[in-house]
Amino acid sequence: MKKVSLFLVGFLLIPILVSAAAASPEWEDIGRGNSYFRSVLVYQEDSRIMFAGTNNAILRSEDKGGNWRVVLIVKGADKAVNLLARGFTEKNSLYAATGNGLYKSLDSGKSWIKVFKGRNSLQSQCLAVLDSSFGIFLGTKEGLFYSSDNGRTWQKKRDGIGDNAVLAITGNPKAEGLIYFACSNGAFVTQDKGNSWERIFVAHPPEKNPDLEEKTDDARKEEKLPDIRYIAVDHNNPDCVYLATSIGVYRSSNKGLSWELIPDYGLLNKQVESLAISVSSEVYALSPSGIFVLRKNRWQELSLGLTGRVRQMVLGDQDNLFAACDNGLFRAHIGEWSAVTDRDYLAQYRKNEPAIRQVQEAAIEYAEVNPEKIKRWRMQAAKKALLPQVSLGVDRDTGDLWHWETGSTTRNDDDVLRRGRDTIGWDIRLSWDLGELIWNQDQTSIDVRSKLMAELRGDILDEVTKLYFERIRIKMELNNLSIEERKKRDERQLRLDELAASLDALTGGYFSEALNGRKP
């Protein structure tokens, strides 16, 4: 009976496993036990030759990642190899941007020499490098440097960029002299080999003169523009530029003159860290949640099955996608994989789950942070001026004396002055402050509460969204585990229950009731 049960369970899992396999490419670990990968470089003309940068060394492979050997050990406080790039002017030249300067190789990575060391720790942290026909551009955490003699001497470029960090540099072989720079203060472009610069995207508001700065409300003061993380150009169309920012991916079809924010549907985390454009102009994005590809205005995850943080992604030849991770170097052949577009493969995992919008609304209702509450307060405050202020007064007079005159000389108490009855007066006053029809002092308090409520609502929605989609990912991971992996399955199931309990705590028990069909 036990064997039959296992067979039935395995048979039922087959459609789910096939669907999950179609939804994401299969990843192969080619790190061979090495870890803490930060960058990767594949020779386009000979895919057998590969280089990988770790947190302290550069590795070289001549058999597509079958075997690796160390060709450089980086010394210093920051040893990470942030970027590996091919040279342009010298044959077999390579560059390695590290946390302790820029290294160069003239013999296909067999030996290395340091060609740049900054004057301080920030300049020594090299983040990006581009070798062109007219010079080498080097991006550091403290500005941009340029060399016109193959790295023997360097000069700092101060126009526009200044001392801001240069995060990425990219060009296009079809448009010589056109180079884009992603910096901490914005995106820049030069179209005349670095002689002049133009800022095409602002990352932070420009500094203002405090003496001339006008007074603004709190919401305006807290407004921020997105942070830039990376810039990429479509080699098939040099006019098409993409920006990775803290709120998503921007696209420009006219060399950065105007920008549009690409819809983030399917992108689990809007903080995009880097981009890659394929030979067929497909856009790949790397975020803390994984690797995604944009197809039909929808982002689809490719990193299912990867564990650990992905530090860099690189598109190689033959439709290979490489991921440098903390726990290894992985390769996926995306040419054999096709995205499911007509049928949402995630529907099976969401079938018994309440919609994310319903869970968010339940959390907002439970925490009493609905925006309608503020609107209701504002309407009530506006109507306050129509209601009068009522005052009630009472006047009591006890000073009246009554005198009785009877004319009798024999009766007692004749001609005696007696105290009269108390006299009580009432008055009611109604008053209106018509000035409150124009401005009500309660509006100031409502504005403060509205700001605090908006912040709290944002935090709650972020937490609910994170927990909700983590449940989906855990359920997908459960389906990919074999029946024999009992310990892992138990741990994942416990995590599912924990996430459900957390969602119940945020929604007042709505989530579990919806799972059991007691809530619409």
Image (spheres, rainbow, N blue to C red):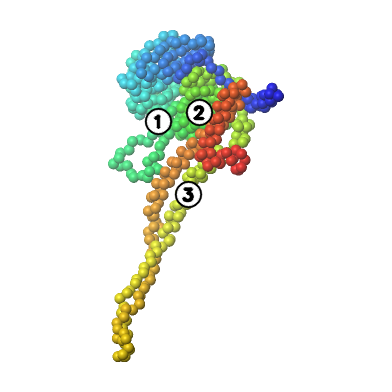
- Compared with 357, 427 (above or below) is below
- Compared with 143, 444 (above or below) is below
Name the residue carrying label 1.
186
Tell me the residue at 31%/80% (across/down).
418
**Which one is closest to the eye, mark 2 or mark 1?**
2
Residue 212 visible in the current orientation = yes
Q: Who is closer to the viewer here, 350 or 123? A: 350
The amino acid sitting under disc 2 is Ser
Badge 2 local density, few (<14 within 10 Å), some, or many (20+)?
some
Numbered badge on residue 512: none
Q: Are marks 2 and 1 in contact (CB under 8 Å)?
A: no
- Return the disc, 3 or 2, that comes first in the chain's sequence: 2
The amino acid sitting under disc 1 is Gly
Left of 447 or right of it: where is 25?
right
Badge 3 local density, few (<14 within 10 Å), some, or many (20+)?
few
Tell me the residue at 43%/41% (across/down).
455
Quadrant of residue 509 in the image?
Answer: top right
Name the residue carrying label 3.
373
Residue 280 visible in the current orientation = no
Marks 3/2: CA–CA distance: 34 Å
The image position of residue 279, as x and y in percent, is 54, 22
